[in-house]
Image: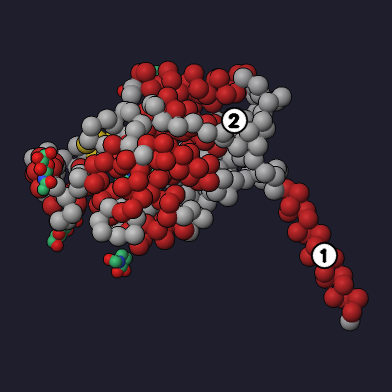
Amino acid sequence: MASYYFLLFVLLAATELSEAGAKKKLSSDFYSSSCPELLPIVQKGVIKAIKNESRVGASLLRLHFHDCFVNGCDASILLDDTSSFIGEKTAAPNNNSARGFNVIDDIKAKVEKACSGVVSCADILALAARDSVAYLGGPSWKVGLGRRDSTTASRADANNSIPAPVLNLTALKTSFANQGLSVKDLVALSGGHTIGLARCITFRGHIYNDTDINASFAQSLQSKCPRSGNDDLLEPLDLQTPTHFDNLYFKNLLDKKGLLHSDQELFNGGSTDKLVKKYATDTDAFFKAFAKGMVKMSKIKPLTGSQGQIRINCRKVN
Ligand code: HEM
Ligand SMILES: *[C@@H]1O[C@H](CO)[C@@H](O)[C@H](O)[C@H]1NC(C)=O
Ligand SMILES: *[C@@H]1O[C@H](CO)[C@@H](O)[C@H](O)[C@H]1NC(C)=O
Ligand SMILES: *[C@@H]1O[C@H](CO)[C@@H](O)[C@H](O)[C@H]1NC(C)=O
Ligand SMILES: *[C@@H]1O[C@H](CO)[C@@H](O)[C@H](O)[C@H]1NC(C)=O
Ligand SMILES: *[C@@H]1O[C@H](CO)[C@@H](O)[C@H](O)[C@H]1NC(C)=O
Ligand SMILES: *[C@@H]1O[C@H](CO)[C@@H](O)[C@H](O)[C@H]1NC(C)=O
């Protein structure tokens, strides 16, 4: 009997060890010998794409967020739907909304030319998000590398795990907590809305039904986003500087000029008011917390070691 339990113990310990062996930590020099040109290739690709279209930096940041919140940062969002495969691109939060895929394709093609079959799409996405924020005037940070790409995707998980703009503060906190992210991360990372645009369909409820909104701001939005129709009309998430990464998003929240219901929830008499005030007055504190939050977010459940694969084409499994 005792030897049976001992054997069981040895087996369990061995399993844990081999799993630990497959799970490697991300490191910023992961490709330093296998693909030394990686970082400049990604950065050049991002800058070229933003010079062509200023919004796309925001789109790349959001792609990384929507990748990481659905079973980890594994490039699952990049997989195309086919007749036999349903992916995340057409999930409710992404359909007609997630963009920037061509930029990742262009960068991936250049990376493949320089070092074939070595660099994951998930790592390229993490780097592109960082380079976008830095180029638009925001903070920079070291990106841990060594993620691998998924061979699967889940539309249901994308529907359920990506927070919706109708959520209240409690639900937003829960959504982030489910990913191991704190309330501070929630507030700081929401500051990603200092860049980019949102469609009428995503803020209609806020401008017609909510009271925590400046009346003249609501009125001016109502004149462009009617009660029905014009669903795809775009408005900046940060009304002054949607292509500059700054702290005006938080200043706008103090004035009840958040565009989304979820934005204004962060400053609506609740526990996060203090942090919003802090970031509205202290850009440096915001940038530090944003960078820290991004590093945490980009480490959500990565595939490492021999898990997953290095996709050759980010849109399909090898
Ligand atoms: C806290 C919960 C969040 C909610 C409810 C939310 C919701 C939304 C919605 C509804 C849009 C507009 C989509 C459209 O109209 O197609 C949007 C855009 C955007 N979001 Fe979020 N978001 C959240 C957090 C984040 C985070 C954590 C980041 C990044 C760190 C982020 C970055 C962006 C960016 C950059 C855009 C603009 C994208 C573009 O212009 O292409 N968001 N978000
Ligand atoms: C430039 O941006 C437009 C959208 O404004 C996009 O359709 C086009 O593919 C982009 N071109 C390049 C080379 O990235
Ligand atoms: C995605 O959007 C397209 C175009 O609006 C629509 O035809 C399609 O039904 C949508 N897909 C899903 C899964 O909702
Ligand atoms: C996800 O949301 C889309 C769009 O609302 C819907 O058509 C689809 O049935 C949902 N899919 C799953 C698997 O939950
Ligand atoms: C927040 O939303 C959840 C889910 O919709 C709801 O159950 C809860 O009562 C709401 N909380 C507050 C404080 O409004
Ligand atoms: C606004 O409130 C009305 C009445 O409660 C409701 O019928 C409608 O669906 C809400 N609109 C949005 C976009 O949430
Ligand atoms: C709402 O915004 C307008 C325009 O910026 C401003 O003049 C007005 O004072 C604001 N209203 C309130 C109640 O703060």
Horizontal relation, residue 180 to residue 256: left or right:
right
Horizontal relation, residue 82 to residue 19: left or right:
left
User: What residue type is disc 1 on?
Assistant: Leu
The residue at which mark 2 appears reads as 312
Going 41% across and 31% down the picture, which residue do you hit?
138
The residue at which mark 1 appears reads as 11
User: What residue type is disc 2 on?
Assistant: Ile
Q: Quadrant of residue 38?
A: top right
Q: Quadrant of the C terminus?
A: top right
Q: Quadrant of ligand 5?
A: bottom left
Q: Quadrant of residue 135?
A: top left
Closer to us: 138 or 312: 138
Going 48% across and 21% down the picture, which residue do you hit?
45
Q: Quadrant of residue 287?
A: top left
Horizontal relation, residue 20 to residue 140: left or right:
right
Residue 63 position, x and y percent, is: 43, 38
